[in-house]
Image: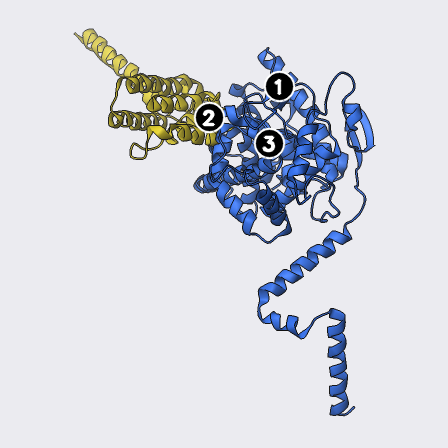
Chain colours: A blue, B yellow
Amino acid sequence: MNNKSLSLVTAILITVYFVYAKLTPQTLAMSSKSEPIVEMIDQANQKVQMTANIQSEDLTCNCKIQDAILNQLSFDNPIECGKKGLDRNYLEPQLSSFKKSDVAGSYYKKRNFVSSNDVPLKCLLYTMKEFYNYAERNRKEEEERIGSPLAELFGYCSSEKGTPISKFAKPCLTEDYVYPIYNAFLDVTNCFGMDQKFFIPKILVESGFHLNAKGPNGDAGIGQFTSPAIAEANKIIDSMSNKIMNDKSLACQNLANYLKDNPNTLGKAGKKLSDLPQDRCAFLTSPPNPIRSLIYYAAFQKRQKDSVAESLNSLEPLMKKAGISDTTKFPRNIINDDLFILSYNAGPNGATVKFSNWLKFRINKHPKIKISKEDFNFANDIPDKYKDLDPKTAEKEPLTLPQYLKVYGKNYVRSVYFQKEKIDRNLGESVCTQNTFLQL
Amino acid sequence: MHAKYIFTTLIVLGFFIGLSVDVKAKFQKTQDPNLAKDSVRSIVNKEIVKLKTDLNNKKSNKERFLLLSSSVKKINSVRKKFTRQSEVDENYMDLLMAALNHIPTEKSFKKEDCHSYKNALLFQLEPLSEEKPSEPGVKEGFEVLEILCK
């Protein structure tokens, strides 16, 4: 082939390429400006992902919920929820209002796409159902312990003002109830880079994703907000809002559209939301919840996680003394996760106090027994002999961190880990949870 | 004469042995947690009770913060003199000290910001509590902040 033929073939190939790729010389010229091209590729990728995932909802499970064995999860039927003298569909009027507030339609209904990186809907549906068992069992145990009745697990607010009134009936798990929470959870976690699988077992123990979950101390909503939690989230809510508004990811854009259509979602005219108990209904009513409560949840979690990391840094000398300075053997991010979960009820500083006390306990009272990875293993059952151990005699044993927390602190981390194991058994290993959750 | 000398020596020796045992029990680092258990925690508690009373009696902010820092120093010093106490007591005292450490310094303290100081303390040590903590150590420290905010 001579040079002339070679040039001709090359020209034909280039022309064919332009025709098939639908690229014009103008779009080619844009490649000098890299950003628009990157954005175009991003958008194209998102579209491909959307169309690739249009499929029916997978709700299969191998579940045992309230003694019933299920191989398929299902939504509640709103008509059934109104029977037996209990109106469980009491949130329906608010959910209808939420639909109207969701002008872009990103939240209130089933989406045509879900990224394969997102947890499936069944993770939330299971969590919501299982929360009834978990919380009710806990409440009964606590009532027996203190010898007096506790408030109901759910609250109701007719408007954003006021404190929630106790509600006996658990909410009806209709599609109108579950989809807004699921879609908002995906967008908030994706927008702020939160690992969904880390939060599923954690939220199951906190609120079960219920819009109107209510704790005994006034903690309420998906994030179980108290005054200190709201006040702390308020410190960074402006930067969270800026991130939503300026980030080009689809998740942030969906949230940004909702905030533009509902400008009071994160506070009125630059004024932060009140942290006072008498204004707690602001975190229960819909609209703007679940959007508001999930963004606030993200802000609060960030504050807690950052604060734990800061406190943990100050413990490096102690960790060195305890023989756990090797960060490949004892990864700090996992220890940080342990303490981050513990900080839900112990607080970031309280969690590190417990951790540092455990280290000092092992250094001073059991110096001959080296701390190993197993000492951080929340997967191991707490041996029966430690369950009702007298705190005075317990210290004769070289307690592991989970055992120490059981005897001298809060057993919360173990509860979350127990739920992770249960979710795995019911919905499949790592479908909804991290494979290496809390494991060194 | 000889018997009198022996008797006096025995009395003097007995006095010094008795004194040294007492000093050991009170001020030296002891290996027996049960021996020291009540003493350290009760010394710390007495100091906090005294601090609260004194804070209530003083009106000047400067004096109040001096009392606070003096009590914190005393407690730290007492705790250093003893070996590790029972885990229940160590956790109690650490949480108490953590709560006291979350009280702002005199320079940055403003009564109008008390609501946010209380929230910040609770966030760090007992975020599920709405207005008052329930953990005994945190509660003691929180009450000191409340007096300063009066």
Q: In this view, does B109 lie above or below A26?
A: above
Chain assignment, label 2: B
Chain assignment, label 3: A
| Residue drawn 79% across the image and 35% down it | A61
Kindly indicate whether the residues beneath marks 2 and 3 are on one polypeptide chain.
no
Q: What distance separates the C-alpha of mark 2 from that of mark 3?
A: 18 Å
What's the amino acid at mark 2?
Asn
| Residue drawn 69% across the image and 72% down it | A24
Q: In this view, does A321 lie above or below A225?
A: below
Q: Is residue A360 visible?
A: no
Which-is-in-front pick, marks 3 and 1? 1
**Residue placed most toward the observer, A261 or B15:** A261
Locate the N terminus of chain A by quadrant. Answer: bottom right
Q: In this view, does A82 lie to the left or right of A136?
A: right
Mark linked to residue A166? 1
Locate the C terminus of chain A by quadrant. Answer: top right
What's the amino acid at mark 3?
Val
Residue A228: x %, y % from top left: 48, 30
Circle 3 residue: A413
Decide: few, some or many residues near mark 2? Use Cα within 10 Å; few <14, some 14-19, many ≥20: many
